[in-house]
Image (spheres, grey):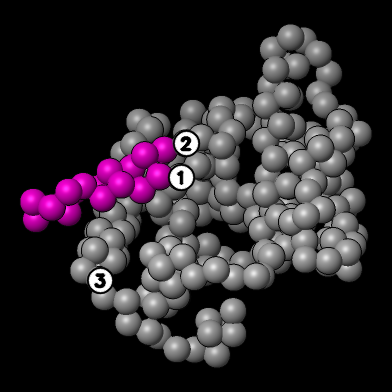
């Protein structure tokens, strides 16, 4: 969004008093979803029934951190969204027959700039990897909040990065699908990435990292970016 903002936040560590309520809410939801799918897989292997809606609520409450919100009003506003989101996730998961292989799958992707400089390392976690009936995999990223357009999904660099990590760092092959799972709207928006698209994404990531290494942190002012 803005090289200068990147430098202020991640290089110079300029402190901010803002508390990211949306991030707190998202982290809480991710934790509950991860526990649900892992426990469902464990129970299925043991011949036990799937987790209940009450189980899901309990795991969500265990991960909830009031201090992650700037005030009681903000916390209450997010609280009002919990029931609908958990209802939708639970119903959608029970309706799905997907085989969940991994939750919060960590990766360490290394990219060779090709100019003799050290490898670029990108670490992260993939929210979820499903095995599809076809035998391929679906790389899934949970999202709370409003859904994006299909065009945005097709151009989403984050999804390309996850697919690239699945192929080149984790040895899972090129995903058949990459998906943004909008849990509050109970919508899964899927797309795919070809090997050619993943190679292009790799080059884009190398170019961005090379710019960072060069110390080029020019400002790109805009009302939206500067407003945040």
User: Which element carries disc 2, helix, strand or loop?
Assistant: strand
Closer to the chain start, of discs 3 and 1, is: 1
Residue 211 x/y as whole percent = 25, 69
Q: Is residue 125 above or below residue 35?
A: below
152 shown above or below 183: below
Dot 2 or dot 1, earlier in sequence? 2
- Residue at x 83%, y 66% (from the top left corner): 71
On the image, numbered disc 1 is attached to which residue? 124
- Left or right, 61 with reference to 213: right
Gap in Å between the C-alphas at discs 2 and 1? 6 Å
Element at label 3: loop
Judge from the rendering whether residue 20 lies leftward or rightward of residue 73; answer left or right.
left
Rounded to the nearest angstrom, the CA distance separating label 2 from label 3 is 28 Å
Q: Which mark is residue 106?
A: 2
Q: Which residue is mark 3?
A: 215
- Say whether marks 2 and 1 touch (CB < 8 Å): yes
Residue 126 rendering spot, x and y as whole percentages:
51, 42
Q: Nearer the viewer, residue 7 or 13?
A: 13
Q: Is residue 46 depicted above or below 197 in this figure? A: above
């Amino acid at each position: 969004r803005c090289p200068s903002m990147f430098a202020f936040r991640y290089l110079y560590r300029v402190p901010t008093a803002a508390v990211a309520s949306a991030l707190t809410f998202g982290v809480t939801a991710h934790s509950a979803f991860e526990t649900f799918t892992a426990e469902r897989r464990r129970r299925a292997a043991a011949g036990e029934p799937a987790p209940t809606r009450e189980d899901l609520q309990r795991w969500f409450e265990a991960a909830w951190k009031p201090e992650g919100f700037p005030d009681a009003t903000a916390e209450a506003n997010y609280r009002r969204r919990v029931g609908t989101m958990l209802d939708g996730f639970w119903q959608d998961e029970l309706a799905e027959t997907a085989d969940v292989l991994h939750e919060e799958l960590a990766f360490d992707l290394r990219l060779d700039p090709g100019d003799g400089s050290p490898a670029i390392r990108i670490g992260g976690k993939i929210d979820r990897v499903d095995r599809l009936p076809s035998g391929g995999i679906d790389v899934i990223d949970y999202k709370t909040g409003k859904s994006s357009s299909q065009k945005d999904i097709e151009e989403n660099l984050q999804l390309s990065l996850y697919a690239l990590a699945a192929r080149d760092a984790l040895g899972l092959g090129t995903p058949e699908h990459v998906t943004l799972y909008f849990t509050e709207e109970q919508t899964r928006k899927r797309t795919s990435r070809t090997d050619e698209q993943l190679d292009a994404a790799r080059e884009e990531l190398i170019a961005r990292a090379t710019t960072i290494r060069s110390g080029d942190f020019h400002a790109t002012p805009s009302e939206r970016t500067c407003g945040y």
